[in-house]
Image (cartoon, rainbow, N blue to C red):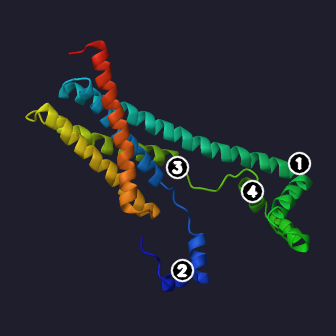
């Protein structure tokens, strides 16, 4: 990734630019939901396809199993992500109510907590007391400080519905791609599986590349890493299907 020029960094760190950036409302981040949905969608769906072909099933059976898994597992992922995001919000709200109650009932104890928290950061004497006085004068700041410093709950914009929708959409999109060759009746079964494998590999590599652009990682390394992860899961599914076919004598 190309480094930001010194001139641009200087402009971004002018007082007015800093104030504008820090005062802007944080939007819910969905990149992790998209990556999670896309990777899991492609891995689980292609794993079903690989397992079905490894077991010697026809393309139509693999297609049925693949689409059934695509919808069921995609819905399950979306619901799980919704509940996880909702639980995170509820946990922070519960901690907020507890801190507000403690401030009302035992303010001296909460002041001491603030004092010790910032003393552990290296502040002492008049500076420390000034920090305690400043924070305790603003109830909202006081509560937010306790949530971050004592409970480790960072303030973040989370939308459970948005997270669930993004996870479900990317799961369906990425997971459906390896199934496309199975819709071509004119293709030989062997070629259907080969094309499905190629498409799945392309999806894995593309997801890794997109991650590299977002998180400033080396493109090739990120792409290959995701490809190897998905490939390992698919190989395991194919091998399992093949071994079970041999074990149970399925023709």
For residue 91, the mark is: none
Q: Looking at the image, can residue 127 be seen?
A: yes
Which is more N-terminal, label 3 or label 1? 1
Label pair 1/4, CB-CB below 8 angstroms: no
Which residue is labeled 2 in the image? 12
Label pair 2/1, CB-CB below 8 angstroms: no
Which is more N-terminal, label 2 or label 4? 2
Quarter holding the N terminus is bottom left
How many residues crowd around disc 3 within 10 Å: few (fewer than 14), some, or many (20 or more)? Answer: some
Which is more N-terminal, label 4 or label 1? 1
How many residues crowd around disc 1 within 10 Å: few (fewer than 14), some, or many (20 or more)? Answer: few
How many residues crowd around disc 2 within 10 Å: few (fewer than 14), some, or many (20 or more)? Answer: some
- Depth-wise, is mark 1 or mark 4 nearer the camera? 4
How many residues crowd around disc 4 within 10 Å: few (fewer than 14), some, or many (20 or more)? Answer: some
- Badge 3 marks a residue whose secondary structure is loop
Residue lying at 33% horizontally and 35% vertically, measured from the top left: 235
Give the quadrant of residue 239.
top left
Residue lying at 86% horizontally and 73% vertically, measured from the top left: 127
Q: Which percent across, then down, holds residue 129?
A: 89, 69
Which residue is labeled 4 in the image? 149
């Amino acid at each position: 990734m190309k480094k930001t020029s010194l001139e641009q960094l200087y402009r971004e760190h002018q007082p007015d630019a800093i104030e504008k950036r820090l005062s802007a409302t944080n939007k819910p981040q969905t990149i992790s939901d998209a990556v999670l949905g896309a990777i899991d969608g492609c891995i689980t769906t292609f794993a079903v396809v690989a397992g079905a072909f490894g077991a010697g099933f026809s393309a139509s059976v693999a297609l049925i199993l693949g689409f059934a898994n695509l919808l069921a597992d995609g819905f399950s992922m979306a619901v799980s992500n919704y509940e996880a995001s909702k639980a995170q919000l509820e946990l922070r709200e519960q901690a907020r109510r507890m801190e507000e109650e403690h401030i009302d009932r035992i303010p001296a104890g909460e002041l001491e907590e603030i004092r010790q928290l910032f003393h552990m950061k290296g502040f002492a004497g008049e500076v420390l007391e000034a920090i305690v006085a400043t924070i305790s004068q603003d109830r909202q700041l006081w509560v937010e400080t306790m949530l971050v410093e004592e409970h480790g709950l960072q303030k973040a914009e989370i939308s459970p519905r948005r997270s669930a929708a993004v996870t479900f959409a990317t799961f369906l999109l990425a997971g459906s791609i390896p199934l496309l060759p199975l819709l071509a009746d004119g293709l030989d079964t062997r070629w259907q599986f080969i094309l499905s494998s190629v498409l799945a590999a392309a999806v894995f590599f593309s997801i890794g590349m997109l991650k590299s652009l977002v998180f400033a990682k080396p493109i090739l390394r990120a792409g290959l890493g995701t490809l190897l992860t998905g490939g390992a899961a698919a190989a395991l599914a194919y091998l399992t299907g093949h071994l079970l076919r041999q074990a149970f004598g399925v023709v």
